[in-house]
Amino acid sequence: MNKLSLIKTFTTICETKDISLSANKLSMSESDIYNHISLLEEIIHTKLIQHSKNNFNLTNAGETFLVFAHTLLMKNHKNMIKLTDHDQIFSIRIGMPTDYIEIYLKTYLINFIKIFTNIELNIDTDVSGNLFKRLDNQEFDLILATHWQQQAGATLLYERRFHWVAAKDGISHQQQPRPIALYPENCPIRVQVFAHYQIGMPLLNIVLTSPSPHALCQVVESDLAIAPIAEFRINDNMMILDPSEYQLPPLPTFNESIYVATPDSAAVNFLSDLFQAIKH
């Protein structure tokens, strides 16, 4: 069975919230509607819809899956058929920072692509500065990367505000030299820390270098160091430091964007559309 027809049945039910109306709209029997949904849930091993005679609700997984489904169907249908019903496998080389992997795995993105398209993903993680260089060297078809300036040809996903953060009620931010945790060399966040460091500021002692934001957060919470942390990761065990008060390098707003090396590829463009569709 054409998987696109399963997707179409699912999105139609989500729009009508009524099995009978969906059957009429799709010129199908109600039993076929139920069979389509059951088969779809069987394929992805996930419950998408909770329904009874007078009640219809999407599960959390169903809400996420609906985003992908709309993205698949709203684009050029001819190109989408190439990605779903053709024997050809489209291989895409993707680069992204390490912590992005967790974000996009949680959205079922990888499983969706694996099941509903003929796209084969080859994912490599690196810091953003290295990703830009490797994209220029044609090692990737698409990257997701962080920068403090909007780059030519980029598609913005998010703007991220970073803050210097210390442990709540801790002492690390008062120590001399200041113990800090940073991302590795060529990370734009690290680059900007030293770009804005000025003579007269307290000496900085790097006690941890890691590509993992979780590692930086743990070091901060343990009061072993201060670190530049994205605003959405700051929790109640941390406190934000005013750069002026504590003589720390100011941090610009960073952006997370998509950069495409092969803009004429239907598969790459489709994947870019999916990343944009699941912005959170």
Image (cartoon, rainbow, N blue to C red):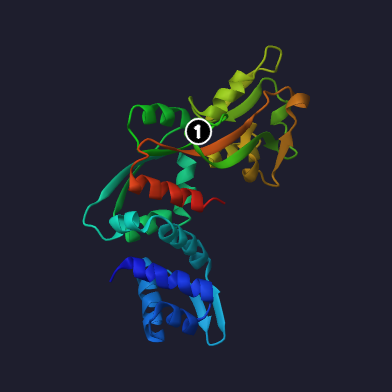
Quadrant in which residue 204 is drawn: top right
> Which residue occupies the extreme top position in the image?
199
Which is nearer the eye, 256 or 74?
A: 74
Q: Residue at x 57, y 29 (%)?
A: 149
- Classify 51 as above or below 62: below
Q: Is residue 100 above or below residue 192?
A: below
Q: Residue 248 at x, y = what percent?
A: 69, 24
Name, please, the residue furthest toward the left. Answer: 87
Quarter in which the N terminus is drawn: bottom left
Can you identify the residue that label 1 sits on?
A: 210
Residue that lies at the very extreme toward the bottom in this rendered image: 53
Neighbor class of circle 1 (other Cα within 10 Å; few <14, some 14-19, many 20+) is few
Indicate left or right for 225 with 24 as reference: right
Q: Give the quarter of the image for residue 133.
A: top left
Q: Is any atom of residue 124 visible in this view? A: no
- Vertical arrangement, residue 199 with respect to residue 59, above or below: above
Q: Position of residue 20 (x, y in %)?
A: 47, 85
Which residue is located at x 36 percent, y 58 percent? 77
Residue 20 or 202: which is nearer the viewer? Answer: 20
Which residue is rendered at x = 66% and y = 43% of the image? 234
Q: Is residue 240 left or right of residue 125?
A: right
Q: Check the image and report above or below for 191 versus 275.
A: above
Count of all numbered marks drawn on residues in the image: 1
The image shows residue 52 at horizontal and vertical percentages of: 52, 85
Can I make out residue 138 in this image?
yes
Task: Name the amino acid, label 1.
Answer: Ser
Residue at the location (71% across, 13% down)? 200
User: Left or right of 55: which side holds 82?
Assistant: left
User: x and y percent of residue 233 in the render?
Assistant: 62, 44
From the viewer's side, name the closer residue of 93 and 219: 93
Q: Is residue 256 left or right of residue 162?
A: left
Query: Which SS class for mark 1?
Result: loop
